[in-house]
Image: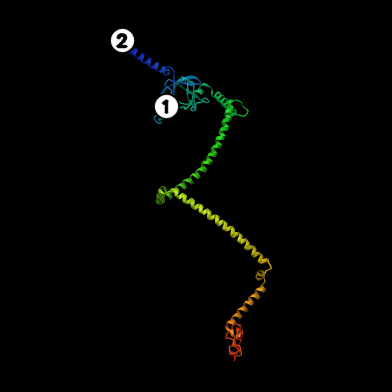
């Protein structure tokens, strides 16, 4: 039985198409000859992750990434489709799908991790979402516990080195430089505090100065007219001084000063004479006060003063009586007649007291 050419071409075409599909799937990591399950995981960043990136467990590839698309419900997330070919492995629902790096120049792959196997009730079903996660480059190269111990050792070593840098017991340029920097930092902090206190004080003084300047400028602005007049007067005075004969004025001033000097010298001589006179007068008064002469007795003896006063009074009465009654003391008779009897004058001061007594007696009669 001969197969027609058309059937041959159709069969060849189908084989080629199937081969192309199988090849494409194989290239992207899918094996159509093996059964597989599909799971999903959400990532917020899928940089360097591509379709056909492997899915591994403990470094062993069990599948591949077959699709990456944007999550329509949350555009900040990307949905990654995982195809797991080995059906003998059961994954718990809390399986973590860690996005890891294959090396310094490699791409990304997804590492599946879980704590324990599932027992059937908590196993993930095809179409479920794994828990997303990220595993750094160093974490992919070194085991987690080993990495933790290594980082702890490195951290402790760095800490010890940093703690010992600049210690007094350490020698070397680096340690001395650190100690110098510490001293410089302390001095800088002290200087900063001093400058801060100085600036605060200066700020108060500066504010007070500004207030004073403000008051002065205000006063100048208010007294602008007075200042203008003063400046004009000074201008007039300077102009007058420029026109005046200052040489002659100075000469007259010198002559006046010389005359004043002579007058002062004469006044000093007068003061000396007056001082001598006052000294002599003081000595005379001292001798009068402490001596035994008549003048001293007159000043110091009250009885002598009383007697002199009484004598002076009687002498005044005698002179008054002579004036009022001259005939009582002088009697001149041309014809030799006898002397007339003395008749007291009325209201004779010498007998003033007797007249008053006489008048009182006459009034009583």
Q: Which residue is mark 2?
A: 5
Q: Residue at x 34, y 13 (%)?
A: 13
Q: Is there any visible trace of residue 198 in the rendered image?
A: yes
Q: Position of residue 41 (x, y in %)?
A: 44, 26
Q: Residue at x 57, y 57 (%)?
A: 269
Question: In this picture, is 83 found above or below 304?
Answer: above
Q: Nearer the viewer, residue 11 or 143?
A: 143
Q: Nearer the viewer, residue 317 or 87?
A: 317
Please state if 290 lies on the left or on the right of 271 as rendered: right
Question: Quadrant location of the C terminus?
Answer: bottom right
Q: Residue at x 63, y 63 (%)?
A: 282
Please state if 281 lies on the left or on the right of 202 as rendered: right
Q: CA distance from mark 1 to mark 2?
A: 47 Å
Q: Nearer the viewer, residue 269 or 184?
A: 269
Q: Position of residue 34 (x, y in %)?
A: 44, 18
Which disc number belongs to residue 79?
1
Q: Residue furthest bottom?
A: 365
* Rendered image quadrant of residue 172: top right
Question: In this picture, is 186 found above or below 320?
Answer: above
């Amino acid at each position: 039985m001969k197969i027609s050419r058309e059937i041959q071409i159709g069969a060849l075409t189908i084989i080629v198409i199937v081969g192309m599909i199988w090849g494409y799937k194989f290239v992207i990591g899918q094996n159509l000859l093996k059964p597989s399950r599909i799971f999903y995981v959400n990532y917020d960043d899928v940089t360097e992750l591509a379709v056909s990136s492997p899915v591994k467990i403990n470094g062993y590839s069990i599948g591949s990434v077959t699709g990456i698309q944007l999550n329509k419900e949350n555009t900040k997330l990307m949905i990654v489709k995982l195809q797991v070919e080995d059906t003998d492995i059961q994954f718990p629902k809390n399986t973590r799908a860690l996005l890891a790096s294959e090396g310094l120049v490699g791409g990304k792959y997804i590492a599946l991790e879980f704590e324990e196997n599932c027992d059937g009730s908590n196993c993930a079903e095809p179409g479920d979402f794994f828990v997303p996660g990220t595993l750094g480059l160093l974490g992919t190269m070194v085991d987690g516990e080993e990495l933790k111990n290594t980082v702890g050792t490195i951290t402790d070593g760095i800490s010890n080195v940093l703690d010992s840098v600049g210690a007094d017991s350490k020698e070397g340029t680096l340690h001395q430089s650190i100690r110098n920097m510490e001293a410089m930092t302390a001095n800088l902090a002290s200087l900063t505090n001093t400058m801060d206190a100085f600036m605060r004080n200066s700020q108060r003084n500066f504010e007070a100065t500004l207030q004073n300047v403000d008051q002065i400028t205000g006063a100048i602005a208010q007294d602008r007219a007075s200042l203008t007049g003063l400046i004009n007067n000074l201008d007039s005075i300077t102009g007058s001084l420029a026109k005046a004969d200052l040489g002659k004025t100075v000469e007259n001033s010198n002559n006046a000063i010389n005359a004043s000097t002579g007058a002062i010298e004469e006044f000093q001589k007068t003061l000396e004479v007056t001082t001598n006179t006052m000294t002599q007068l003081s000595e005379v008064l001292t001798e009068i006060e402490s001596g035994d002469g008549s003048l001293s007795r007159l000043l110091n003896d009250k009885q002598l003063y009383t007697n002199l006063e009484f004598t002076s009074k009687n002498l005044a009465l005698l002179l008054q009586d002579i004036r009022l009654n001259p005939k009582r003391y002088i009697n001149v008779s041309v014809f030799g007649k006898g002397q007339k009897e003395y008749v007291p004058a009325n209201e004779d001061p010498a007998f003033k007291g007797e007249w008053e007594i006489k008048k009182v007696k006459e009034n009583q009669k």
